[in-house]
Image: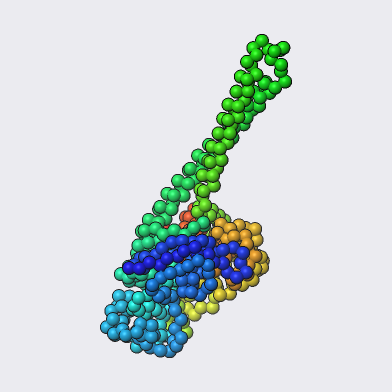
Amino acid sequence: MSLINISNLTFSYEGCYDNIFENVNFQIDTNWKLGFVGRNGRGKTTFLNLLLGKYVYKGSISSSIDFEYFPFEVENKEEFTIDVIKKQAYNIDDWQIIREINLLDLSDEILYRRFETLSNGERTKVLLVALFLKENNFLLIDEPTNHLDLNSRKIVSEYLSRKKGFILISHDRAFLDGCVDHILSINKENIEVQKGDFSSWIKNKEMQDNFEISKNEKLKKEIKRLSESAKRTAEWSDKAESRKIGFDPSKVEKNISRRPTEAAKAKKMMSRSKAIQERKTSIMDDKSKLLKNIENSAELKLSPLKFHTPNLITVNKLNVFYGEKRVCENISFSVNEGDRISISGKNGSGKSSILKLICGENISYTGDVFINKQLKISYVQQNTESLSGSLVDYAEKYGIDLSLFLAILRKFDFSRSQFEKDILFFSEGQKKKVLIARSLCEKVHLYIWDEPLNFIDLISRMQIEKLILEYKPTIIFVEHDKFFTDNIATNVISI
C-alpha cells in the first residue's frame, strides 16, 4: 500500500479567469477502487491529466507509483491483439493474458486477430487487460462504458471488482456499485473522498443536503426573529435615552434619581441590542456555510403533443441489413401513445439502425414499417461530432425558443459564461446535454433517443429520469444504463 498525496492543488486553463481547482487537499490509497463522480465540466478528466503530468499546476502531487490512462492510443491497429497487449505489459506469459481475457468473456482466438477488426466493446476489454497486466501502476480509467452494451458492462464491472488500484470515471450507477469501494466526488465547493459505493454516497449526500436545507430554514427564521427583536430593543433604548436628556431634575422632577435610572435603562437596552446583533451575525455566518454543495437539479418540464390516434408506429417482421449482411431479423412491435420503449441488444445488433429507419434515414431493410405521416419526431443521435458554433446559432438552426433552450441548459448546470463559448469546446457530456435540451424544446409526438446518456453526469441522469416519469412522453430509446432503463421503460424490445 502507498498513498497519492494532493496538497494545495490549484489549476486553471490558460486564458481562463476561473480556477478549475483551488487549494485542493486530499489523499488516495493506491489499494482503493475509486469511483470518480461530479457534474459535467467540473474537471474530472482534467484531474486525471494533472496526475499524468500533462499540465503545469501549483501545489504538489506526490506518489511512488506510475499512472496509466485508459483508453490509450494503439499506434498500429494492424497488429495482432496479443502484440498490442505485450507492448504494454512486458514479460507477461501467454497464459496470463488468456486468463485475463477469459475473465472478460473473450475467446482465445481474439488474440490472433488484428486489433482493427475488433468491435469497440472488444477493444475496451483488450485495453483494460493490457493495463492491468502491467506492474506497479495505478489506472486512470476514463468512461469505459460508452461502447459497452448492458451485458458487457456487467462483465467489465465484475472484472474491475476483482482488481484494485484505480480511479474510475463513470456515470453508470449500477456499474459503479458493482466495482468500487470508495467515491471521489468533485462538488461545487470542494473535493471529498468517502468510503462505499455510489448508492451509499448518494444516500449520504441526500441526507446531508436535506439536513442543510432544514437547518438553513431554521436559521432564516431565527435571523428574522432576531432582526425584529433587535429593532424593538433599539427603539426601547432610544426612548430611554431621550427621557434622560433635556431635563433639570432639580427644577422639574420630584425624583432627582430619574436621570441616572433612565441612563441605566438605556445602557441596558443598548447592551441587549448589541448582544442580539452579535448573535444574529454569528447565525448569519453559520448560514453562509450551508448549501454550498447543493447541486442545481431543478425540475425539467416537457410538453409533448397529443396524437389524434393511439397507434403511432407498427413494425412487422423487420430485417435490417448492413450491405448484404443481415444484422437483425424478424423484429415486430408497435408504438402507442404513452409507450416508453427500450430497444436492447448487443453492440452491432442493429438497434441504432431501427431508430434511424423510423426517423426516415435510408436504411436497407425488408418487412413492413408503418409510420403515421402526420407524426412529428425529435431525434437525439449518438455522436456529437457535428456540433460547433454558438448556442444562439444552434437554436436558430433548429427553430427552437432560445430562452427556453438556455433555461434548460442552466438547469443542466451550465454557467452563464458557458453560453458565450463555441459548442466545439464543450465537454462531451455538455455536448450531449445540448442535444437533449434541443429535443426537450421541440413540440413533437414522439421522442427517439439513441444512447442519450453517454458522458452525462449522474445528477443530470436522475433529472432526465424524473422528467420522463412525470410527463410520460412517448419515447423509443436505446440506453445501456440499467437503472435508467429499469425505471422508465414500459416495454423492452430485445434484439
Vertical side of 266 occupied by 465: above or below: below
Number of marks = 0
Q: Residue furthest top?
A: 254
Question: Where is the N terminus found, in terms of image quarters?
Answer: bottom left
Image location (x, y in percent) of residue 28: 39, 64
Asked where in the image residue 181 lies, by quadrant, the reply is: bottom left
- Identify the coloring: rainbow
Measured from the top left, where is residue 63 in percent x and y? Answer: 41, 70
292 to 91, vertically: above or below: above
Q: Is residue 303 left or right of residue 451?
A: right
384 vs 175, left or right, is: right
Residue 320 visible: yes
**Point 50% across, 52% down: residue:** 294
Q: Position of residue 32 (x, y in %)?
A: 35, 65
Q: Which residue occupies 29% across, 85% down?
A: 94
Q: Is residue 377 visible?
A: no
Residue at the front extreme, as displayed: 250
Camera-side residue of 183 and 78 = 183
Left or right: residue 489 compared with residue 443: left
Q: Position of residue 230 (x, y in %)?
A: 59, 32
Q: Please give the name of the residue rendered at 47% of the width and 67% of the height, measured from the top-left corner.
A: 60
State the residue in front, 66 or 145: 66
Image quadrant for the C terminus?
bottom left
Give the image quarter of residue 259: top right
Residue displayed at 65% across by 58% down: 403
